[in-house]
Image: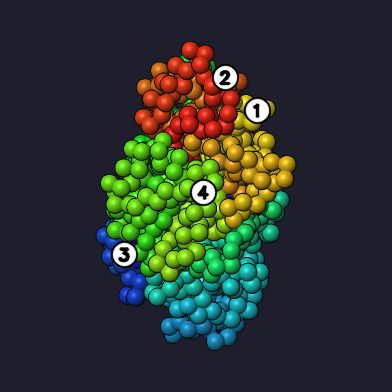
Amino acid sequence: MNKAVSEEDIKIKICGLKRIDDAKILNKYVPDYAGFVFAESKRKISFDKAKAIKNVLDETITTVGVFVDPDIEDIFYLIKNDIIDIIQLHGNEDEEFINKLKEFDSNINIIKSIEMNNGDSENKHDDGFNIKKTIEKWENSNVDYLLLDSGKGSGKIFNWELIGDIKKIKKPVFLAGGINSENIKKASKIKPFAFDLSSGVEKNGFKSSKKINEVINNLDNINKLNNKSKNKESKNNKSNINKSNINKSINLNRLDDVKDMNNGRYGIYGGQYIPETLMNELINLEEQYNFYKNDPDFIEELQNLFNEYAGRPSLLYFAENMTNDIGGAKIYLKREDLNHTGSHKINNVLGQVLLAKKMGKTRIIAETGAGQHGVATATGAAFLDMECEIFMGEEDMERQALNVYRMELLGAKVNPVSSGTKTLKDAVNETMREWTTRVHDTHYVLGSVMGPHPFPMIVRDFQSVISREIKEEILKIEGKLPTAIVACVGGGSNAIGSFFNFIGDKGVRLIGCEAGGKGVDTEYHAASITKGEIGIFHGMKSYFCQGNYGQISPVYSISAGLDYPGIGPEHAYLNDIKRAEYVPITDDEAVEAFEYLAEKEGIICAIESAHAIAQSIKIAKKMDSDDIIVVCLSGRGDKDAESIKNYKLAKSNKSDKLAKSSNSAKLNKLGEEEI
Ligand SMILES: O=C(O)c1ccccc1NCC(=O)[C@H](O)[C@H](O)COP(=O)(O)O
């Protein structure tokens, strides 16, 4: 979400951070303030711990030190060492104390807490008169904000009527005491400057990602409603970027720009068109996923796997030679090819295998076409110690014998699929069938943003690390968002991963490159959006290449990775609402781009990714030098080198018989499945 933050928005403070994990949670949701409790309390933390948390915390979040009658030297220490930005006082600190703080640093802001019902003798307010006097005293003092609270992180609400008309209070007011996602809407009617929450966003004594997410979502909606006219989406991303907006858009659950992306439906697409026997397992999967995606331990474990095992973050590489050669926009490459196992596939695999393990499953199954998703799945299963079986069309097994060996080497059993055309779509059917027979101990690691809900959502979320990193990296390097993101599309997992965190940034063009094969006016392509029609297949409603009677057509692409007859439902929806553009790229254009990238940048990319390179070359020329294109280089191309050599040879000998029959075309397919 790329929300324009208004001065009039009600701010939010999350108090009582105790763990590094809490900082990581806050970084996802980016509240305005974060509080460290230094007073005696179950939430008390040491100065060192606060420093460590602050080091991890997003720097746009203002840190607040919370004290009860502290030693003033402690506060000086915390300010000098940049551990806290603001002071919050809950004890009997007097005006002399406040003045000393201001003398030390006149810019430091101070929040003074007023206990509205349960305070010590001086602050005991059983009647409105005493409250009024206390508020009067502090609004005429040197403090900057008042905090109206029921106690000290007590989790109890006080009688809000005691506040009276908040507009008459001369200082901005933080409202605290038992605020949570359920009562925040009602509390917002009081119109405080900020909400201050601790107990209401805790579970078992720790800050809960789920509760923080809910409360911040609710507050965003409240702010939007209160402040509609000032909260409009930025039309021009270059003029309206600030760091806090950007971080908020990272959050997977807050894409309220794309409202229809809910409950397994993306507009009319998606759904769960599956046999009843699988329904319970899909419901179970969705419930478990919704729990674990908010679980700090799961998030931390997955992040560690990404960083320590898969080699993330992947490089955002400035293709300077290409840029200079083409002229026009600057071209950056998101180097997913450098990940362990050589493609973006590992992002989804690690997420799903870890999830399966948490769900108590002991066995993993997956489909594969050319073998790349199979190899990635076998890798994840080996590393996380799970039994693994891969389903692969007989024809693909023959063409990709080396990948079959790789999977076996990694401990997986590879099952040949002899039905249908003995290729990828048949492998999906067979894996689905197998799953129905053994859901109790088995998880199906689907390889793309396709299939029945919740797979398109789960795979997208795990792949969205790509756009999260692109956003962070490009802002660091260029200080602005890109003009366009370009990615190849089969089923669409690398593309949705690259697009996801930019969907709310309307100024960023999102371009998916479909397999145009021998041309979309021939029979030999796999351009499901350009040429397909709405249908239902593999458990989802989307665009599919179909015959006159709705039968799924055989499709063709030089790249086996893009050779899938459909597209993920979220892409179908993004196409319909015109948020993303989908263009066909022919085999010849892709091969040319494959060679061009190798020559100019010394990078041999997957033939799938070369489709995106081809499109970036086309559009870069027409752009200005201050435009930026980021291309997702979804995989490495060693696997394709020999086949492309043969393809070229066949062409130059004018002996290319590929176009003559879909069968012979299939025999010449290359690469890695992207579906
Ligand atoms: O949270 C504590 O344990 C605490 C101890 C001593 C002084 C202040 C303390 N907390 C302050 C806060 O967490 C907030 O300002 C506010 O009280 C939160 O209230 P609630 O949401 O009811 O926990």
Q: Closer to the observer: label 3 or label 1? A: 1
Q: Amino acid under label 2?
A: Lys
Q: CA distance from mark 4 to mark 3?
A: 77 Å
Residue at 69 percent across and 41 percent down: it is 547
Q: Residue at x 50, y 59 (%)?
A: 433
Label 2: how many Cα within 10 Å (few below 14, some 14–19, many 20+): some
Q: Residue at the spot x=37%, y=50% of the render?
A: 414
- According to the picture, the residue beneath numbered tag 2 turns out to be 621
Mark-to-mark CA distance, 3 and 2 = 62 Å
Q: Where is residue 84? Give x, y as percent.
A: 37, 57
Badge 4 crowding class, 10 Å Cα cut-off, few under 14, some 14 to 19, many 20 or more, is some
User: Which colour assignment does the render follow?
Assistant: rainbow
- The answer to which of marks 1 and 4 sits earlier in the sequence is 4
Residue at disc 4, secondary structure: loop
Numbered tag placed on residue 522 in the rendering: 1
Gap between marks 4 and 2 measured at Cα: 46 Å
**How far across and down, in percent of the image, does residue 88 sit?**
42, 65
* Cβ atoms under marks 4 and 3 closer than 8 Å: no
Q: Upstream in the sequence, badge 1 or badge 2?
A: 1
Discs 1/2, front: 1
Assign a secondary structure to mark 1.
loop
The residue that mark 3 highlights is 72
> Which badge, 4 or 3, is on the more N-terminal residue?
3
For discs 3 and 2, the disc positioned in front in the rendered view:
2
Decide which of 201, 538 is in the foreground and name it.
Answer: 538
Three-letter code, disc 4: Ser
Three-letter code for the amino acid on which mark 1 is drawn:
Thr
Cα–Cα gap, marks 3 and 1? 79 Å
